């Protein structure tokens, strides 16, 4: 955020890298949420003596998760639109 405000949104390459790092951060937040809340408690439920090695959990998103993701994408698109108007990212046009 500080890098965008310092540059006033003039460098599109900087905006690309900042947004990419934000998306990677969101991916790791989702992974940590899924891993910590589902994998460890499910391993504790196994009472048998012979357990399989832990693997990836098959996770199919519910309709609620899909709608929340689409809403988040809509908010991101709205913020991008507001940012392009606020920081004047369209260098070709005169506003």
Image (spheres, rainbow, N blue to C red):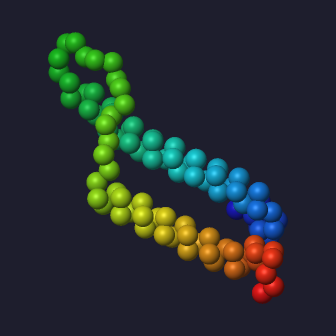
Residue 53 in the image, given as x and y percentages of width and height:
33, 18
* Quarter holding residue 37: top left
Q: Can residue 6 be seen in this view?
A: no
| Position of 25 relative to 58 (above/below) | below
| Position of 45 relative to 83 (above/below) | above
Quarter holding the N terminus is bottom right
Q: Can residue 29 be seen in this view?
A: yes
* Quarter holding residue 59: top left
| Residue drawn at 65 percent across, 57 percent down | 19
| Position of 14 relative to 30 (above/below) | below
Instruction: Give 20 or 34, whichever is nearer the viewer.
Output: 20
Residue 60 in the image, given as x and y percentages of width and height:
30, 46
| Residue drawn at 47 percent across, 64 percent down | 72
| Residue drawn at 19 percent across, 13 percent down | 49
Q: In the displayed image of the protein, which residue is found farthest to the top?
A: 50
Residue 56 in the image, given as x and y percentages of width and height:
37, 31
Q: In the displayed image of the protein, which residue is found farthest to the bottom?
A: 95
């Amino acid at each position: 955020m500080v890098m965008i405000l310092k540059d006033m949104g003039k460098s599109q390459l900087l905006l690309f890298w900042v947004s990419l790092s934000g998306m990677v951060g969101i991916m790791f937040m989702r992974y940590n949420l899924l891993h910590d809340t589902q994998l460890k408690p499910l391993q504790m439920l196994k009472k048998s003596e012979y357990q399989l090695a832990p693997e990836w959990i098959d996770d199919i998103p519910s309709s609620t998760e899909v709608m929340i993701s689409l809403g988040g994408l809509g908010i991101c698109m709205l913020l991008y639109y507001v940012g392009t108007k606020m920081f004047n990212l369209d260098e070709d046009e005169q506003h």
